[in-house]
Image (cartoon, rainbow, N blue to C red):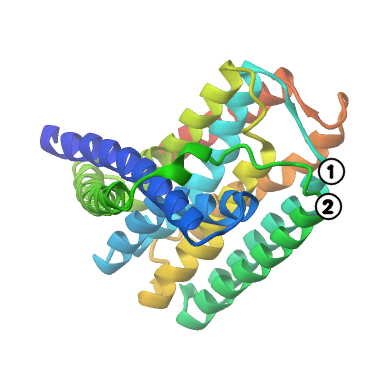
Amino acid sequence: MIQSILFVIIGFVLLVVGGEYLVRSSVALSFRLKLSKMVIGLTVVSFATSAPELLVSLQAALGGSADLSLSNVIGSNVANIGLVLGITALIGPLAIDKDFYKFNWPVMMLLSLVLYFFLDNDGVLTRIEGGVLLGSLFVYMFLLIRRARKHADKTTEDVDDSLEKISNFKMILWLLIGGVALYFGSELLVEGAKDIATEMGVSEAVIGLTMVAIGTSVPELAASVIAALKQEKAISLGNLIGSNIFNIASVLGVTSLIQPIAVTDTRLMNIDIFWMLGFAMILLPLAFIPKKMVLGRPKGFLIFTCYCVFIALVFLK
C-alpha cells in the first residue's frame, strides 16, 4: 500500500512538472510558427494543459482499465467546477462575461449531453463516436478563434511573451522533459491507483473519480488559486469551461480512437455522469442569481459544498 501511494505521489509530481514544461515548449514553438498570441492562448495552451488527463486516460485504456480513463474525465470535469471554481470563488469574486452563456456554457453542455447519449446507447465509446467528439473540438476552436478576432482588444493574458525569445535547444529540451515526465507520471499514477483500488476493495472508477481526477486537476487549481490571491483576473470561468470541453472532446476523443472505451462499472452511468451534468447545469442559474454575472463567496461555498458531498457519496456507495 505504501509503495502504491508513493507511486501516485511521484506520478502527480511528474504530471505537474511535465505539464508545465509541455506548455512552455508548446508556446515557444507556436511563436516560431508565427501564430498570434491570441491563437496560442486559446488553442495551444488549452491542448497542453489537457495533456495530463490525456496521458492518464490513454495509459488506463490501453492497460485494460477503461473505467479509470472515463472516470478520470468525469471526475476532472466535476473537480474543475466543484473544487477549482468553488475554492477560487471563495478566495475572491469572479466576474462572468457574456461569452459564458452565449458560447462557452452551451458548448460544454452540448458535449456533456452528447457524451452521455453515446455511452448510454451501448455502453461503449466507439472509434466513430470518438471521431465525432474530436471533430467537434476543431469546430469549437474555429468558432472560438473567429469570435476572439471580433474582440481583438481583449488580449490573452495567459501567454508569456518571454517564451518568444527561447533558444531552439531549450525549446526541444523542455519538450523532451515534458514528454518523458508526462509518460512516466501517467504510468506511475495509473499503476498506483489500480493497486490502491484493489487493496481498498473499491472499484477503479472510484479512484479515478477522486484521487486521479483531483491529481490531474492540480495544475488548474494551483493556477486559479495563485491568480485569485494575486487578484488577477487571468483565470476565469471561461478557462475552466474550456478545460472541460477539451477533456471530453480531445481526451476521450483521442483515447477512444486508439482504444474504444467500454463502461464496465455501472455506477459511472447510473450516478457519476449525472453529477457531471448537474455541475455543468447549475452554473447557468448561478450566473443570473443576484449578484448578477458575479460568482461570489456564497456561490463558491455552495459549489464547493456540493463537491464535498459528491466525494463523500463516491466512497459511501
Query: What kind of residue is marked 1?
Result: Lys
Query: What kind of residue is marked 2?
Result: Lys
Task: Evaluate whether residue 240 shows in this view.
Answer: yes
Residue 72 coordinates in the image, percent (x, y): 42, 51
Q: Quadrant of the C terminus?
A: top left
Q: Is residue 212 left or right of residue 196?
A: right
Q: Is residue 189 left or right of residue 239?
A: left
Q: Quadrant of residue 100?
A: top right
Residue sitting at x 50%, y 64%: 250
Task: Provide the secondary structure element on which disc 2 rests.
Answer: helix
Q: How many marks?
A: 2
Between 264 and 299, the one lying in front of the other is: 299
Q: Quadrant of the N terminus?
A: top left
Q: Which residue is mark 1?
A: 98
Task: Evaluate whether residue 72 shows in this view.
Answer: no
Q: Is residue 291 positioned above or below 248 on the image?
A: above
Residue sitting at x 19%, y 47%: 195
Between 286 and 21, the one lying in front of the other is: 21
Q: Is residue 241 left or right of residue 183?
A: right
Q: Is residue 6 positioned above or below 130 on the image?
A: above
Going by the picture, which residue comes out furthest to the left?
3
Residue 79 coordinates in the image, percent (x, y): 52, 39
Task: Provide the secondary structure element on which disc 1 rests.
Answer: helix
Marks 1 & 2, CB-CB < 8 Å contact = yes
Residue 102 badge:
2
